[in-house]
Image: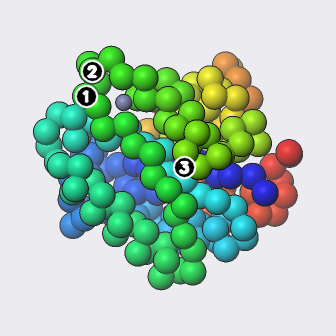
Amino acid sequence: MRDILLDRDGVILEEGGERVLSKEQMRFIPGAADAVARLSRAGHRVFVVTNQSVVGRGLISAEQLAGIHRAMQVEVAARGGVIDGFFACTHAPDAGCACRKPLPGLLLQARDHARVRLHEALFIGDRISDAEAAWAAGARFMLVLSGHETSAPLSPRGPMGVARDLQDAARQILHGALAT
Ligand SMILES: [Zn+2]
């Protein structure tokens, strides 16, 4: 079964104009925790792939970021699902790293460390930079309109599914509306 890679802010958590800096600021997009759990319970492995330069810029520590991700895991577990892993770029935007999206480094880490088969995987994100990372890694991409982008580009540079939000995306995936 295909692995599902999810961007975090704007897909699972509310972006809210500010990056999430603490567990207390963490707000799930309505239906998103359920959607993650449904995908997991259906047998998909689910990974979070996220740019978190808040660490590299010194706004939060790596431990605080891990705490946010543990809290996300708890919410999904309460619904009978599991997040199989987190891949985060914690570097500052000007650090010149190979993992900050739109570069595909995080997806390559998922391939190398979790044996994600990128050519079968689906990456779901809210930004064109997510799409570019997916395409560069050979993965499929679905844009959700719950975050940064509020409409699908008329001429995307590559193949792109579109969903209103993660709940809608999960429905499309689980009901087989997504061509393989
Ligand atoms: Zn990085």
Q: Is residue 15 above or below residue 151?
A: below
Looking at the rendered structure, the kind of residue marked 1 is Ala
Badge 2, how many Cα within 10 Å: few under 14, some, many 20+?
A: few
Q: Is mark 3 within 8 Å of ligand 1?
A: no
Please name whichever residue, 17 or 79, is drawn nearer the observer in this view of the structure. 79
Task: Report whether residue 116 is seen.
Answer: yes
Please name whichever residue, 64 or 145, is drawn nearer the observer in this view of the structure. 64
Q: Position of residue 100 (x, y in %)?
A: 40, 29
- Residue drawn where x is 21% and y is 67% of the image: 24
Task: Report whether residue 153 is seen.
Answer: no
> Which residue has dot 3 on it?
6
The C terminus: image quadrant: top right
Q: Is mark 2 within 8 Å of ligand 1?
A: yes
Q: Is residue 153 above or below residue 85?
A: above
Q: Quadrant of residue 131?
A: top right
Q: Which mark is residue 92?
A: 1
Specify which label sits upstream in the sequence, 2 or 3: 3
Left or right, 165 with respect to 171, comes to left
Q: Position of residue 75 (x, y in %)?
A: 43, 74
Q: Which mark is residue 95?
A: 2
* Element type at mark 1: loop
* Element type at mark 3: strand
Q: Is residue 38 above or below residue 170?
A: below
* Element type at mark 2: helix
Q: Quadrant of residue 27?
A: bottom left
Looking at the rendered structure, the kind of residue marked 3 is Leu
CA distance separating discs 2 and 3: 23 Å
